[in-house]
Image: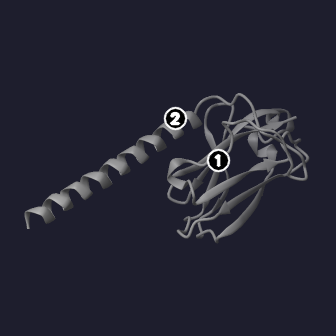
Amino acid sequence: MSKFYTLFTYLLFLTLLVSCTRNDAQREFEQEAFSAPSNFTETTSQNEVILVDKDDWRTSPLFQGLVTVIPPYPNPTTTDQLVQFHVDVTGVQSVSGLDVLVRLDDGTLRHLYDNFETLHTGYNDFRIDPIEFALNYNAEGARGLHRVYIYDGNQRMISYGDIMVE
């Protein structure tokens, strides 16, 4: 009986340790996400990646092996083009929807897209109008580098990256 409790205690401790490590990694990822944008992954309108910013569109520790965010395109974009996103759900677990936000010039966050239905396995596509990156929804205010955040429906960060509007 004593060996059973020792084994149980060890397994419980190991589970808690792994959980804490993953939570710490997630917190660190989110802290990095809220830094100022500094570069962007350049893509064509045909979804070809030209130049990679290693900080953009990484998958958070909580979603590694479950979700991949394909770099949005085109990037850079203009206020006349929609930016296309592909979120590839590869794991067997479900993802409880998507909530996409942008940080505005005044530091507030604006919702750009939300879908709180469970995502299906494979590509989940959506488009965003870059004019929504502007505080007052105008073309001049939309120009510049913008940080975009992707969360699941439970407000757990999946990924983030930067989009340049010319």
Q: Which residue is mark 1?
A: 101
Instruction: Name the quadrant of the N terminus.
Output: bottom left
Q: Is residue 148 visible?
A: no
Residue 150 percent location from the top left of the image: 62, 50
Q: How many marks?
A: 2
Query: What residue lies at 12% left-to-right and 62% top-to-bottom?
Result: 3
Q: Is residue 115 visible?
A: yes
Measured along the vertical axis of the image, is residue 36 above or below residue 69?
A: above
Query: Which numbered disc covers residue 47?
Result: none
Callout 2: 10 Å neighbours few (<14), some, many (20+)?
Answer: few
Q: Earlier in the sequence, mark 1 or mark 2?
A: 2
Query: Which numbered disc covers residue 31?
Result: 2
Considering depth in this image, is 102 or 161 the residue closer to the camera? Answer: 161
The residue type indicated by label 2 comes to Gln
**Relative to residue 74, is residue 7 drawn left or right?**
left
The residue type indicated by label 1 comes to Leu
